[in-house]
Each structure stands twice: as C-alpha cells, then as structure tokens.
Amino acid sequence: MMGTTIAIGALGPALAIGMIGAKGVEAIGRNPEAQSNITTNMILAIAFAEAVAIYALVVSLIIKFT
C-alpha cells in the first residue's frame, strides 16, 4: 500500500516538472533576453510541484507506521 501511495503521488509532480522544464527551455529559446526571469519562475514552479511529492511521501510513511 505504501509503495502504491508514493508511486501515484509522485507521478503528477514528475509529469509537471517535466512539462515545466520543457516549456521553460522553449520560452528561453524564443526569448533569450528573459532567461533570468524565466529561470526564476521555473525554479519556483518546480519547488511547488516537488512539494506535492513530499506530501505524498509523508502520507505513505503515515500509512506504514500506523
């Protein structure tokens, strides 16, 4: 049960991080002058997406130890 929880919980953030990275690189390719702004926003969005995976990990650990 714990493995399924973390697998499903990490699937969404993994896809989101991949899409954020792809679109960010595409945006930098179109507008290289805005690289610093795009990179900052990308890192912030990736951190928010990664937080969801961390919540899934916490839930799976709660399931394991209760």
Image (cartoon, rainbow, N blue to C red):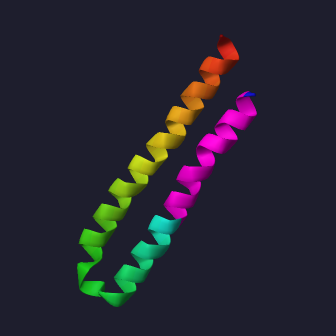
Question: x, y (%) of residue 40?
Answer: 29, 63
Spot the residue most to the bottom. 30
Q: How many marks?
A: 0
Q: Is residue 6 magenta?
A: yes
What's the magenta region? 2-18
Spot the residue most to the top. 66
Q: Is residue 12 left or right of residue 52?
A: right
Residue 23 falls in which quadrant of the image? Answer: bottom left
Q: Main secondary structure of the magenta part?
A: helix
Q: Is residue 54 above or below residue 23?
A: above
Residue positioned 45% across, 41% down in the render: 51
Residue positioned 40% across, 49% down in the render: 47
Q: Is residue 24 left or right of residue 33?
A: right
Residue positioned 53% across, 51% down in the render: 13
Question: x, y (%) of residue 10?
Answer: 60, 45
Residue positioned 50% across, 33% down in the render: 55
